[in-house]
């Protein structure tokens, strides 16, 4: 569950931060996600996800994901992911993700 949330978060993170260009990503057999913009992500045995740009994310037992820069995200029972700055993203039944 925790890895699924982090992967969903990473997907939303990439969509939210790449509005001017498209990025494609794939995960290899070692669990390393590599994106077309050069960014890579991997998760260690403690559940901490790190990228190759010095960022890290972890999810606590309440389902809140925090990064190393003071940001946090959580997803409610309706599937809406919100951050601590008032932004939110949701994915509709067609697989389209929209953020405010």
Image (cartoon, grey):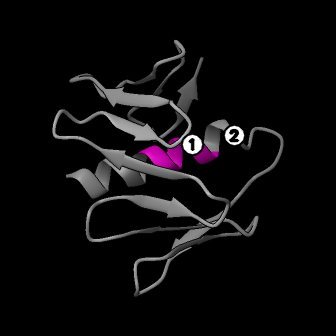
- Report the residue that reaches farthest toward the right: 20
Q: Name above or below for residue 98 compared with residue 31.
A: above
**Tag 2–tag 1 contact (CB < 8 Å):** yes
Q: Position of residue 34 (x, y in %)?
A: 60, 73
Dot 1 surroundings within 10 Å: few (below 14), some, or many (20 or more)?
A: few
Q: Position of residue 61 (x, y in %)?
A: 16, 40
Q: In percent of the image, x 63 and y 67: which residue is there?
A: 52
Q: Nearer the viewer, residue 4 or 50?
A: 50
Q: In percent of the image, x 21 and y 24: which residue is there?
A: 77
CA gap, disc 2 and disc 1 = 6 Å
Q: Name above or below for residue 2 compared with residue 69.
A: below
Q: Which residue is mark 2?
A: 17
- Specify the quadrant of the image occupied by residue 16: top right
Q: Position of residue 67 (x, y in %)?
A: 48, 41
Q: Position of residue 24 (x, y in %)?
A: 65, 63
Q: In percent of the image, x 29 and y 57: which residue is there?
A: 3
Q: Which residues are magenta?
A: 9-14
Residue 78 is marked as: none
Q: Which residue is mark 1?
A: 13
- Specify the quadrant of the image occupied by residue 36: bottom right
Q: Is 33 situated left or right of 60 in this image?
A: right
Q: Nearer the viewer, residue 72 or 97?
A: 72
- Report the residue that reaches farthest toward the top: 86
């Amino acid at each position: 569950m925790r890895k699924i949330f982090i992967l969903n978060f990473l997907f939303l993170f990439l969509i939210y931060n790449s509005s001017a260009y498209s990025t494609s990503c794939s995960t290899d057999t070692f669990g390393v996600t590599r994106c077309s913009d050069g960014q890579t992500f991997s998760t260690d045995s403690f559940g901490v996800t790190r990228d190759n740009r010095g960022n890290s994310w972890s999810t606590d037992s309440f389902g809140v994901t925090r990064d190393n820069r003071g940001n946090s995200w959580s997803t409610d029972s309706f599937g809406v992911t919100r951050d601590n700055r008032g932004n939110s993203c949701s994915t509709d039944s067609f697989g389209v993700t929209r953020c405010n």
